[in-house]
Image (cartoon, rainbow, N blue to C red):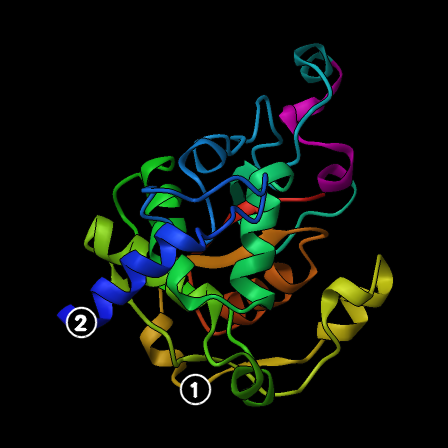
Amino acid sequence: MKLFRSFNLILDFFLPASCKSCNSPVGGSGIPHFCAACWNDFSLLPGPVCPRCGRPFESPEALTYSPGHLCLSCRNELPHFDQSVSVGQFEGSLREAVHVFKYKPCRSLGKPLSRWMAENIGFEPGIDIVMPVPLHKKRLRERGFNQALLLAHGISKRYGLTLSFDNLARTRHTKPQVELSGKDRIANVAGAFSIHRPELLAEKSVVLIDDVFTTGATLNECSRVLKDAGASRVMALTLARAG
């Protein structure tokens, strides 16, 4: 182990790793593939936001014209989750970090990303369970890990919350949501999830975790299944928001 560490130090000296965001040397950031400057440049999601779906309003003045402070989409049709919270904006260095995390794929980014997520979110008392959005077993074999589970593990550990990672399951292999848009995303995940042990969700408050909120179709479908199984409240929490 000591020899391996020494070899890595020598390799970094002669061939220093480059930051995936700015191409400068990673240096002593302690973060795989990213320098400290880019890591510290992650953008938090600005307020104000819709209290239901978390969509940013264009300006504080928009709240004046939004009954109940809900966005137009939520006024037309409420999502199944009770609240959606995204920590950062899916842009710049954070966007690059998510892409490396999921598609390189780089499992070792899970811990620092979940730590950053946990440091910038707070929970009210009363949460019972933390659950990740599941991957289908085929996608799990391809990637080697579920990125949502790694994030959920960090959140549960930081706040001392129960982690449930096998009750909510993806029972149908679906196309990657990134390849679809709008109504196609909703149709793609419809009926794709199920609950193994609904009795464990009766009257429970759940935090449902995923990496990126785009249209919210996956989180909404998971929340519907959780509510149908007896969950009293579902909060959707994502690392970043793209839409």
Residue located 39% across and 81% down the image:
166
Q: Amino acid at mark 1?
A: His
Sequence-first disc among 1 and 2:
2
Position in image of residue 173 (x %, y %) = 67, 86
Q: Which mark is residue 3?
A: 2
Q: Amino acid at mark 2?
A: Leu
In terms of depth relative to the viewer, which is nearer, 236 or 31? 31
Q: Are marks 1 and 2 in contact (CB under 8 Å)?
A: no
Residue located 37% across and 49% down the image:
31
CA neighbours of label 1 inside 10 A, class few (<14), some (14 to 19), many (20+): few
Range of magenta residues: 65-75
Q: Is residue 7 left or right of residue 35?
A: left
Q: Quadrant of the N terminus?
A: bottom left
In terms of depth relative to the viewer, which is nearer, 136 or 222? 136
Residue located 69% across and 24% down the image:
57
In terms of depth relative to the viewer, which is nearer, 123 or 139? 139
Magenta stretch: residue 72 in it? yes
Position in image of residue 178 (x %, y %) = 75, 63
In terms of depth relative to the viewer, which is nearer, 241 or 1? 1
Q: Is residue 13 left or right of residue 161?
A: right
Q: Is residue 2 left or right of residue 98?
A: left
**Dominant SS in magenta:** helix
Secondary structure of the residue carrying numbered label 2: helix
Q: Which mark is residue 47?
A: none
CA neighbours of label 2 inside 10 A, class few (<14), some (14 to 19), many (20+): few
Q: Furthest residue to the left? A: 2
- Can residue 31 be seen from the camera position used here? yes
